[in-house]
Amino acid sequence: MLKTLMFSLSLLFVLVLNIASVNAQSSAGQELITTLDVATSYSDKPITFNVTLPPSYFNNKDKRYLVLFDFHPRSQAYLNGMHDWMSHNGDWPWLETIIVTAPDGDKTLGELKELAIEERGDTKLLDFMELALLPTIDKQYRTNGFRIMNGFTGNAGLGLYTLLNRPELFNAYFVASPVLSKDFAFVIKDAPKKLAAMKGKPRFLFMSTSDSGFEQRQLASFAEMETIIKATASPALEYHIKRFDGSYYMTQPILATAYGIELLFNDYHKMLEPDSEISSKGPQAILAHYQYLTDEKYGFEVPATASLIALAKYEADKGGKTAKNKAIAIYQVAVDAYPHSHTAHHALAQAYAEVGEFERAVTHEKLALKNTDHPFWRNKYTERLVELEVRKKAM
């Protein structure tokens, strides 16, 4: 089973690297893989980071993007390939992201990392990220404020160090097989107090390891860190801890990134079930939940449309005039909250047609058609509009 999994992952890895190579330029001809010079007070020379922009970056100039950062220079290839594959199907499951990776062998950056690891309380690396790196990225590119820090082994340890000492720098942290032994960056010592004191907007942590030979010497400290997180983490931290036992050491960052992305964006992509605790409280509770995700967790809009439509269909399926009217009221909430949502208008049009109100059905089907440029939906709504017009005239 595991051998089959590893073979499949190897094929996927080759595939996504090829995809990344093919997509090195946008359709408009601009380079998607570039570099960014970041000035620092610790050196006369800037530190040059590698940047990969999403394929739509130059074509969709109104869109703003997430940022994922990784200290390892060789992570660029696999991150770019995985991202290209996992985002090309409509931002699902990986929302389109600007990927930034560190240069190979930069002396200044190496010294900053060493100080963070060896000197308890030294904040020069954190200061560089907060005052130089992240502002330069935001100034140069169309970012939306949501950031992910990704890391493997020592860089994963630095991810935990950043989470503990300056959690606001990133919204999410993916740490694969973190080095924690021998007081690495003093993470184990600082974790209990700093995790308990964490406040502010919610942060996300995905931490993983395996039982491979290379990770054996870190398993005790990993288990200790897991215990600390479970015992002391404040409600501000959403954490997920996973073991990929039986898989290879060098596969760990790929597995961690894939699992981390799915878990992080699960509540963005997955609608609330109509019988869930939130949906059972009604459409306003659904709107409040998605407003929380928009304002607190992500900082960009997370639409409630699919969850509202699911609740309306659930109510309509109960049968009877009262149920259908209740469903229409919920569809109307969706349309009022998202007036440019073609799916909300189409759903409301369907509901009106079911109760014989074809004039209103036609109005909303036209609005559904007006609010999408996608060929599939335009064809679907055009066909439906013809049907509705016929039924309206036959009344």
Image: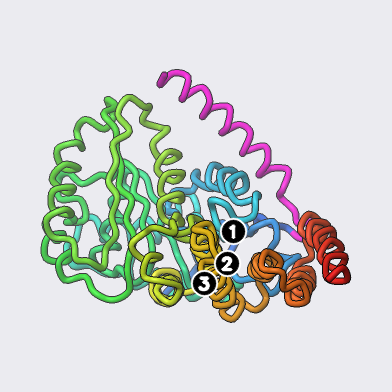
Q: Which residue lies under the disc numbered 2?
A: 65
- Mark 1 lies on a secondary structure that is loop
* Residue pictured at 76% horizontal, 69% vertical: 365
Q: Nearer the viewer, mark 1 or mark 3?
A: 3
Sort mark 2 into few (<14), some (14-19) or many (20+) by Cα contacts within 10 Å: many
Sort mark 3 into few (<14), some (14-19) or many (20+) by Cα contacts within 10 Å: some
Cα–Cα span, label 2 and label 3? 38 Å
Up-down relation of residue 171 to residue 246 (above or below): below
The image shows residue 301 at horizontal and vertical percentages of: 52, 73
Mark with earlier residue (2, 3): 2
- Marks 1 & 2, CB-CB < 8 Å contact: yes
Please name whichever residue, 287 or 39, is drawn nearer the observer in this view of the structure. 287
Mark with earlier residue (1, 3): 1
Please name whichever residue, 308 or 372, is drawn nearer the observer in this view of the structure. 308
Instruction: Please indicate whether residue 85 sits to the left or right of residue 181 in the image.
Output: right
Please name whichever residue, 342 or 29, is drawn nearer the observer in this view of the structure. 342
The image shows residue 122 at horizontal and vertical percentages of: 22, 67
Sort mark 1 into few (<14), some (14-19) or many (20+) by Cα contacts within 10 Å: many
Tag 1: residue type?
Glu
Q: Which residue lies under the disc numbered 3?
A: 326
The image shows residue 328 at horizontal and vertical percentages of: 58, 72
* Residue pictured at 57% horizontal, 49% vertical: 83
Residue 96 — which label? 1
The magenta span reads: 1-30
Please name whichever residue, 91 or 149, is drawn nearer the observer in this view of the structure. 91
Instruction: Please indicate whether residue 224 sits to the left or right of residue 374 in the image.
Output: left
Mark with earlier residue (1, 2): 2
